[in-house]
């Protein structure tokens, strides 16, 4: 389902479900990140639901806290994104120990990168995008994401994450699309 116009990168609060028809497959990404075959098949077979709370904390900094759930209530990962570009370490059963940082940036900051800068809705140009970077030094990969809203896939405005992951000399670029469920 299309996201309401009132839901923007300034407030991503709500429940989102990955649209597998419009999203690129995540199997190749998970494989590059060193996720084992059984867990990859479980994740790629399941419906992934994100429950997001977008707040401003006591210090006046934006936070986006996301709990992922797989079909049947299986706990996925938790994303706690503080938009201050400060690296924070997190360990979970899927990705291991990862150092990640997040921020809001103007879309123009990605203008020289065709993958990250194209296909966004007008409100993204006005409000900016969410930019994240995660590094797993043990597994040897780096993932950059840019989040916003796009209507490129499916023709309706949907929450979209563009992901570029690099490990050694291999780089993948994938687009993940999420349907709006509720506030």
Image (cartoon, grey):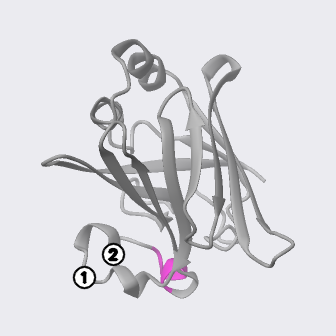
Residue 172 is left or right of residue 50, and the answer is: left
- Disc 2 versus disc 1: nearer the observer: 1
Q: In the displayed image of the protein, which residue is found farthest to the right?
A: 58
Residue 43 lies, in percent from the top left, at 47, 24
Numbered tag placed on residue 117 in the rendering: 2
Tally of numbered tags? 2
Q: Quadrant of residue 92?
A: top right
Residue 159 lies, in percent from the top left, at 53, 58
Nearest the viewer among 81 and 8 is 81
Is 89 inside the magenta-drawn segment? no
Image vertical order of residue 72 relative to residue 113, above or below? above
* Visible residue check, residue 1: no
Identified at 36% across, 19% down, the residue is 36
Image vertical order of residue 84 relative to residue 44, above or below? below
Q: In the displayed image of the protein, which residue is found farthest to the front?
A: 138
Residue 48 lies, in percent from the top left, at 56, 33
Q: In the displayed image of the protein, which residue is found farthest to the top?
A: 38
Identified at 55% across, 28% down, the residue is 47
Identified at 61% across, 70% down, the residue is 9
How much space separates mark 2 and mark 1, taking CA atoms? 8 Å
The secondary element bearing badge 1 is classed as loop
Image marks 2 and 1: residues in contact by CB distance under 8 Å = yes
Residue 86 is left or right of residue 7, and the answer is: left
Numbered tag placed on residue 112 in the rendering: 1
The magenta stretch is 121-125
């Amino acid at each position: 389902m299309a996201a309401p116009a009132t839901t923007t990168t300034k407030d991503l609060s709500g429940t989102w479900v990955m649209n597998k028809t419009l999203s690129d497959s995540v199997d190749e990404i998970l494989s590059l990140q060193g996720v084992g075959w059984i867990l990859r098949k479980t994740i790629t077979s399941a419906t992934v639901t994100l429950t997001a709370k977008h707040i401003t904390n006591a210090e006046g900094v934006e936070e986006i806290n996301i709990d992922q759930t797989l079909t049947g209530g299986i706990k996925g990962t938790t994303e706690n994104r503080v938009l201050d570009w400060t690296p924070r370490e997190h360990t979970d059963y899927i990705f291991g120990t990862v150092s990640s940082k997040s921020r809001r940036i103007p879309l123009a900051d990605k203008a020289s990168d065709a993958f990250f800068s194209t296909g966004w809705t007008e409100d993204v140009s006005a409000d900016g995008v969410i930019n994240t970077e995660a590094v797993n030094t043990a597994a040897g990969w780096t993932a950059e994401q840019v989040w916003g809203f796009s209507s490129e896939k499916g023709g309706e405005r949907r929450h979209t994450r563009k992901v570029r992951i690099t490990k050694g000399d291999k780089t993948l670029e994938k687009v993940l699309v999420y349907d709006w469920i509720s506030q």
